[in-house]
Structures are given as structure tokens and as C-alpha cells.
Amino acid sequence: MEDGCRRKIRVLLVDDDRDVADSLAEVLRLLDYDVRVAYSGEGALGFAGRYRPDVVILDVNMPGMNGLQAARELKRDRRLSRQPFIAHTAADEPLVRQVAEQIGFSHFVVKGGESLTAMVDALMDVPEPSPFQT
């Protein structure tokens, strides 16, 4: 299939740190992802149903509804329940990893250092969307 017919992978990126969110979103756009940004867990809930992302990247530690709570709520939507979720966090704690795995996160990326490389590697596991999906 020609690249012109290929639908870009839709990424919903959720992080309360606007600098981190906007910078990562820009990098992902340069890598040809269709990215939408929400700056809170609550914002992600409002956005996800309309946007229908192929993958959700969530910061775990956010004020109000944290990323783990947001993931639980998002996964209740049958259209999102099987989509990959990637935890993007500075909190590299065993309990947080365990809870994220129980919720259904497919990847756990720790911010800093090689996080951009790890994020791109995680996104490489996301299947190409069907050109017939909207």
C-alpha cells in the first residue's frame, strides 16, 4: 500500500508537565505520528472518546487524577480497552510498575536518560492501523 493511503498512528500523550508533553509530542510528530496532548487525567478522558487513539502515553504522577486512575477509566471504553498503554514516569518504583502491569500497561518508560529511545522502541510495537479505521 502506498504511504499516501496509510493512516498515521494516533497517539494520545498525557502529562501535566507542559514542557515535557509538548517536547515529546513534537518529536513524535517529526517521526510521523498523529499526536494529541492532554495535560491532565481528566483532560485525557474528555479527549480519548473523540480522538480514538491507537496508543495512549500517560504520565503516572499527575495532580488530580493520576495516570493509573486515568488508564483504568480509559480502559472501560471498549474501543480503548485493547489499545496499548505506555507509562511515562519519573517514579521507577516496583509497586508502581506492578500496578501499571495489573491495569494493562504494555510498556513502562522512565523519564530521563534514554527515555526518548525507550519511548520510540515502545511505539514500534504498536500495530499499524487499518486504512479503513477512522
Image (cartoon, rainbow, N blue to C red):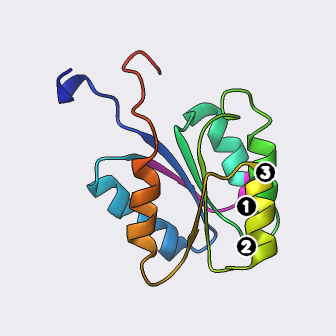
- Pick the residue in front: 107 or 6: 107
Q: Is residue 41 magenta?
A: yes
Judge by depth and name the residue closer to the eye, 97 or 42.
97
Residue 56 percent coordinates (x, y): 58, 49
Residue depth check, mark 3 versus mark 1: number of the one nearer the observer: 3
Which residue corresponds to the image point at 81% horizontal and 73% vertical from the top-left? 95
| Identity, as a three-letter code, of the amino acid under mark 3 | Ile
Q: Is residue 23 visible?
A: no
Neighbour tally class for label 2: few under 14, some 14-19, many 20 plus, Cα within 10 Å: some
What is the spatial separation of the Cα atoms under label 1 and label 2, in whole angstroms?
6 Å
Question: SS class of the residue under badge 1?
Answer: helix
* Viewer-proximal residue among 64 and 129: 129
Q: Earlier in the sequence, mark 1 or mark 2?
A: 2
- Secondary structure, mark 3, is helix
Mark whose residue sits in front, 2 or 3 = 3
Q: Which residue is mark 1?
A: 67
Q: Is residue 89 above or below residue 100?
A: below
Quadrant (top left/top right/bottom left/bottom right) for the N terminus = top left
Q: Which residue is mark 3?
A: 103
Q: Which residues are magenta?
A: 35-42
* Residue positioned most to the top: 132
Which residue corresponds to the image point at 64% horizontal and 70% vertical from the top-left?
Answer: 16
Residues at circles 1 and 2 in contact by the CB criterion of under 8 Å? yes
